[in-house]
């Protein structure tokens, strides 16, 4: 795939390193081949061969590629080519930038939804696809806010009823309760409970 005469899996380490250098300057044209090579280098830890302990340090020093971009190239190849087994030509036609737009929606989706997103990326103009994704993200954000509001309203209703007071009076009572609290410990507990709440919310959506 990465060379007209030699498949990437049969290349020596040095040949793979050289191929990455040759391909990176035309990323949009070569993102599939580049993603394959980087994926193999990362998976087999070939960067150790060059004296690097981390893949990120290797790509940044050797190829002046940011670690985040290299990660996107690897993730795109692994998801669309390796995992979904989409034809190279089809993936290339969609393009690297458009694949990045739909990838967050596909990573935890079922196969039917994944196919729908690939179809959208193929058929929808870039501007329309971007607006569609923007609207979906807005809806997800609003849904998250609504769930948090429901949680807060239920809790406050319970507390107002327990203390038999107004909401304003409850704020005062809570201030009295928390005035001597260990704020570091409170922050730790809140962070953990928020993480559990958001995980449960995400699981229910899926």
Image (cartoon, rainbow, N blue to C red):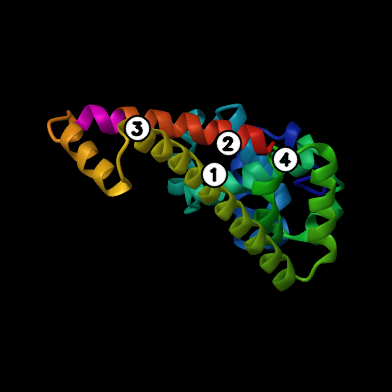
Q: CA distance from mark 3 to mark 2?
A: 16 Å
Tell me which numbered mark, 2 or 4, is placed earlier along the sequence.
4
Quadrant in the picture for the C terminus: top right
Quick one: label 3 or label 2, which is nearer the N terminus?
Answer: 3
**Which structural element holds mark 2?**
helix
The question of residue 184 being in magenta is answered with yes
**What number is the disc on residue 79?**
4
Badge 1: residue crowd in 10 Å (few <14, some 14–19, many ≥20):
some
Disc 1/disc 3 C-alpha distance (Å): 17 Å
Is mark 1 in CB contact (under 8 Å) with mark 3?
no
Q: Which residues are magenta?
A: 183-188
Identify the element where label 3 is drawn.
Answer: helix
**Which of the marked residues, 1 or 3, is nearer the chain's N terminus?**
1
Residue picked out by circle 2: 201
Kindly identify which residue carries mark 1: 147
Rounded to the nearest angstrom, the CA distance separating label 4 from label 3 is 35 Å
The local secondary structure at tag 1 comes to: helix
Number of other residues with Cα within 10 Å of mark 2, as a class: few under 14, some 14 to 19, many 20 or more? some
Image depth: mark 1 or mark 3 in front: 1
Q: Earlier in the sequence, mark 1 or mark 4?
A: 4
Q: Is residue 53 visible?
A: no
Q: Nearer the viewer, mark 4 or mark 3?
A: 3
């Amino acid at each position: 795939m990465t060379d007209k005469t030699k498949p990437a899996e049969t290349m020596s380490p040095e040949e793979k390193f050289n191929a990455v250098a040759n391909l990176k300057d035309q990323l949009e044209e070569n993102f599939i081949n580049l993603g394959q090579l980087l994926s193999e280098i990362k998976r087999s830890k070939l960067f150790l061969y060059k004296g690097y302990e981390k893949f990120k340090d290797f790509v940044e020093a050797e190829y002046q590629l940011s670690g985040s971009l290299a990660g996107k190239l690897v993730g795109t190849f692994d998801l669309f080519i390796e995992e979904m087994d989409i034809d190279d030509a089809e993936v290339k036609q969609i393009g690297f930038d458009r694949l990045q737009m739909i990838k967050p929606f596909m990573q935890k989706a079922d196969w039917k939804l994944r196919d729908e997103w690939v179809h959208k990326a193929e058929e929808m103009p870039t501007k329309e696809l971007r607006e569609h994704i923007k609207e979906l993200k807005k809806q997800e954000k609003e849904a998250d806010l609504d769930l948090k509001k429901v949680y807060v309203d239920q809790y406050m209703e319970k507390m107002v009823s327990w203390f038999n007071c107004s909401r304003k009076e409850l704020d005062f009572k809570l201030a009295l309760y928390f005035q001597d609290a260990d704020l570091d410990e409170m922050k730790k507990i809140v962070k953990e409970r928020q993480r559990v709440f958001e995980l449960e919310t995400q699981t229910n959506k899926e």
